[in-house]
Amino acid sequence: MFVIGSNNRQQTIERLNIARESLRDRPAKLPQHRREFVGLSTTRSHGAVANARYDPYASLKGAVMFIPKMNKDGERTLKLMDKKEGYPKQYDRKRMDVACYPGKTAGGGAMHMIRAWVYVMAPDRARKITRSRSGSKKKWPRRSWNNGMVSIQYIKAVRRMLDETWKTNYDPEEEFSPSASLLMFQWKDCKTRRNKKGKVYRYIPTSRRRIASKACPLGEVVNTYVKKYRVKNFVRHSDRRKVRV
């Protein structure tokens, strides 16, 4: 499985309920594709997520995950990942040719092509749209779109995946494109959540542990009280910091 988003080692182990020693990963590239942040997540928070967009002049860096077919409880791992990725509504799953390094580090030998599963966002979900262009000022099309901003938690997870496999052998401005304008938001600033039944409620923190799950529904991220930061400053290899917009 070739991953381009938040499925770093720890998240993959937790999602699939597999032993740490059963997971192997390698730095890899998906030719003629680039990473973009579009669509809408409804699990971590209502922010954009990673997608592989066709680009004949690009090469998308990610990781090939070699995972066991069954997990600790005898469940099929691919079926579990399908559920986590929202297949087939949010993402489609395709067999694609991926260039993979033979060792754990980039540059450790010649790359070779392998066939791997890749989750590619469904075309009707892979859109950027703002409140002013949604067709309605009152209703936010939450099921399919957001305004292209990403939650800090998601950016951290993608950055960790790249750091684990590529170390510093990747260009953050290329992998977090468009680096000049890509923004992330702090979900803790959002005042609403969505419950399991789909209803939106006002969230009042009652403890130090704040809930990120299903935060910022109905396009709340566009409000000025939700702080925005430049992804470019947060993902570079040195002096990583949050620079507020």
Image (spheres, helix red, strand yellow):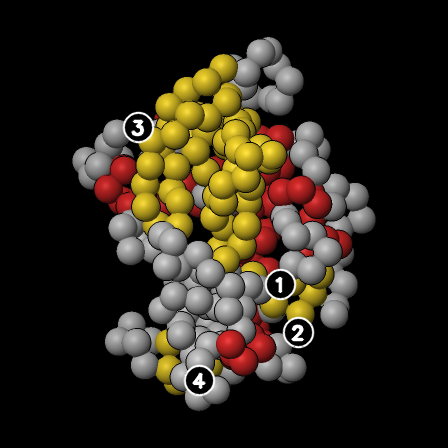
Using the image, determine if residue 90 lies above or below residue 73. Answer: below
Residue at position x 60%, y 69% in the image: 186
Q: Residues within 10 Å of mark 2 (few under 14, many from 20)?
A: some
Residue at the extreme front: 56
Q: Amino acid at mark 2?
A: Lys
For marks 1 and 4 on the same chain, the one whose residue lies earlier in the sequence: 4
Q: Amino acid at mark 1?
A: Met
Q: Which numbered dot is residue 184?
A: 1
Q: Residues within 10 Å of mark 4 (few under 14, many from 20)?
A: few
Q: Residues within 10 Å of mark 3 (few under 14, many from 20)?
A: some
Residue 23 visible here:
no
Give the mark toward the camera: 4 or 2.
Answer: 4
Q: CA distance from mark 3 to mark 1?
A: 34 Å
For marks 4 and 2 on the same chain, the one whose residue lies earlier in the sequence: 4
Residue 192 visible here:
yes
Q: Quadrant of residue 241?
A: bottom right
- Is residue 179 found left or right of 134 in the rendered image? right
Q: CA distance from mark 4 to mark 2?
A: 24 Å
Q: CA distance from mark 3 to mark 4?
A: 46 Å
For marks 3 and 4 on the same chain, the one whose residue lies earlier in the sequence: 3
Using the image, determine if residue 223 lies above or below residue 42. Answer: below
For marks 1 and 2 on the same chain, the one whose residue lies earlier in the sequence: 1
Mark 3 vs 1: CB contact within 8 A: no
The residue labelled by disc 2 is: 227
Q: Amino acid at mark 3?
A: Pro
Give the mark toward the camera: 3 or 1.
Answer: 1
For marks 3 and 2 on the same chain, the one whose residue lies earlier in the sequence: 3
Looking at the rendered image, the quarter that the C terminus falls into is bottom right
